[in-house]
Amino acid sequence: MVGGTGWESGCDLGCGPGQVAHYLRSIGANACGIDLSAQMVRQAQRLNPDIPFQQGNMLALTNVAESFYGGTAAFYSIIHIPKSSVIDALREIKRVLRPQGVLLLTFHIGNQIVQLEQWWEKPVHLEFIFYETEEMKGYLQKAGFDLLEVIERDPYPDVEHQSRRAYLFTQKPSIELLKSQTTFGHQNRDKHP
């Protein structure tokens, strides 16, 4: 385990050029990265040849077994998922986490959608969907995560987009908790037909 956080194996979801996977590896995690963009995966592999990266979709992580990772980080990648699909994406992340596995989820705080047609002097079509912290907490709860910690911060001047940021540290419930909830539900059904 890395620092007692469950990161003995971790994945950077929506990894982009792999900076979070690189950091996880630097602190001793067996890290990897997944990104929707084949171009980003190639860039991440070029910059971090000792870390495995693959193309994948947060809505269907078909190349990842159930309960595989001890932890996942999704730094500003949920902002590319339409609000109507966020719970599905979170459930898929929970599926690939081990019991008591952790998710660190970051996003821009707000309720707007920022659209870009050009970025770094290249034509693009990107949407950045902002979320209110309470809204995302609700999505995480509906997906079955336990919330551990919430941090909000102001943007760094002249370095990044000038929006407030949220960092939500969450955990997949343990098997024992899941079993007790299932058992409790069955007991209730037996007592109340």
Image: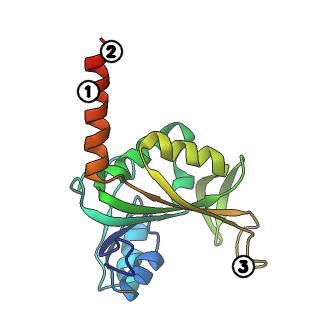
- Find the distance from the CA under tag 3 to the CA under tag 1: 53 Å
The disc, 3 or 1, on the residue closer to the chain's N-terminal end is 3
16 or 68: nearer the viewer: 68
Q: Are marks 3 and 2 in contact (CB under 8 Å)?
A: no
Mark 3: few, some, or many residues within 10 Å (few <14, many ≥20)? Answer: few
Residue denoted by label 3: 159
- Find the distance from the CA under tag 3 to the CA under tag 2: 58 Å
- Residue 130 visible in this rendered orientation of the protein: no
7 or 193: nearer the viewer: 193
Q: x and y percent of residue 125 in the render?
A: 59, 54
Q: Which residue is located at x 70 percent, y 73 percent?
A: 160
- Find the distance from the CA under tag 2 to the CA under tag 1: 10 Å
Three-letter amino acid code at disc 2?
A: His
Q: Which residue is located at x 34 percent, y 57 percent?
A: 56
Q: Which residue is located at x 69 percent, y 53 percent?
A: 114
Three-letter amino acid code at disc 1?
A: His
- Residue 118 visible in this rendered orientation of the protein: yes
Residue 88, above or below 129: above
Q: Which label number is shown at residue 192?
A: 2
Mark 2: few, some, or many residues within 10 Å (few <14, many ≥20)? Answer: few
Three-letter amino acid code at disc 3?
A: Val
Closer to viewer: mark 3 or mark 1 = 1
Residue denoted by label 1: 186
